[in-house]
Image (spheres, rainbow, N blue to C red):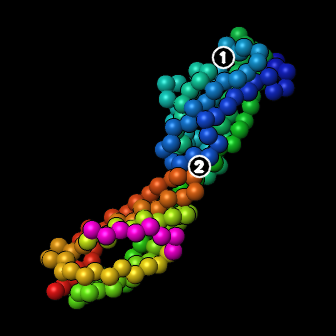
Amino acid sequence: RNEFFPHANSFEMSDSIACPGEVIQLLNTSTLRPNGYEWQSNPQNVTFHASKFVPHPTMILSEPGVNQIIFITNKDNQCYDTMVKPVDVEAVKAAFYSLDTSNFCAPAPVKFHSLSHNADSLAWSFGDGKSTGSERDSLTHVYNENSGKRGFTVKLVATNRYGCIDSVTRKEYIKVNG
């Protein structure tokens, strides 16, 4: 293979930090006008839209971690050049529990514990029309009314500093008697 001048091949990304499933735009900014293109990733957990053989594809990264985006160009199937840039995929995982979930009498203080991973903020919805935001891993919510037979559905939405979001919902999770 004949090599281009060092770093004649170049590209830009719409983001160098992304959430799983986020679309990233890749932009060929090479100076020597190549006419052959190939995009790769390491590890190979990237989905390229349209084709990985075009100058400006979009991609979706599915797994958290640092991925190396590899851009290989050539001029008339010779004179190859390669450039590599990292993109960091930051995932967040929402999870919670409560030790007691039933046989409460109203008013019922219920303590919730977040087991969320990589979360910078938490938004709770308690199923009784009340919700709150929190950065704490534990909080207590007071249920002032009967849940009926079905119980209250509790939802937790976890967000990290990059805007990545995950949520978990427990249907009919908290049961409060009269």
Disc 2 versus disc 1: nearer the observer: 2
Q: Is residue 103 left or right of residue 19?
A: left
Residue at image position (27%, 74%) is: 173
Q: Quadrant of the N terminus?
A: top right
Residue 89's tag is 2
69 or 130: nearer the eye? Answer: 130
The residue stretch that appears in magenta: 129-136
Q: Is residue 66 magenta?
A: no
Q: Is residue 60 left or right of residue 80?
A: left
Residue 39, quarter of the rendered image:
top right
Q: Is residue 74 left or right of residue 112?
A: right
Position of residue 162 measured from the top left corner of the image (x, y, whole percent): 57, 52
Q: Is residue 132 magenta?
A: yes
Q: Is residue 22 left or right of residue 80?
A: left
Position of residue 5 measured from the top left corner of the image (x, y, whole percent): 85, 21
Position of residue 135 measured from the top left corner of the image (x, y, whole percent): 52, 70
Which amino acid type is shown beneath numbered disc 2? Val
Residue 36's tag is 1
Q: CA distance from mark 2 to mark 1?
A: 28 Å
Question: Is any atom of residue 51 visible in this view?
Answer: yes
Q: Please, which residue is most extreme toward the right here? A: 5
Which amino acid type is shown beneath numbered disc 1? Gly
Residue at image position (69%, 42%) is: 86
The numbered mark, 2 or 1, whose residue comes first in the sequence reads 1
Question: Is any atom of residue 115 visible in this view?
Answer: no
Residue 44's tag is none
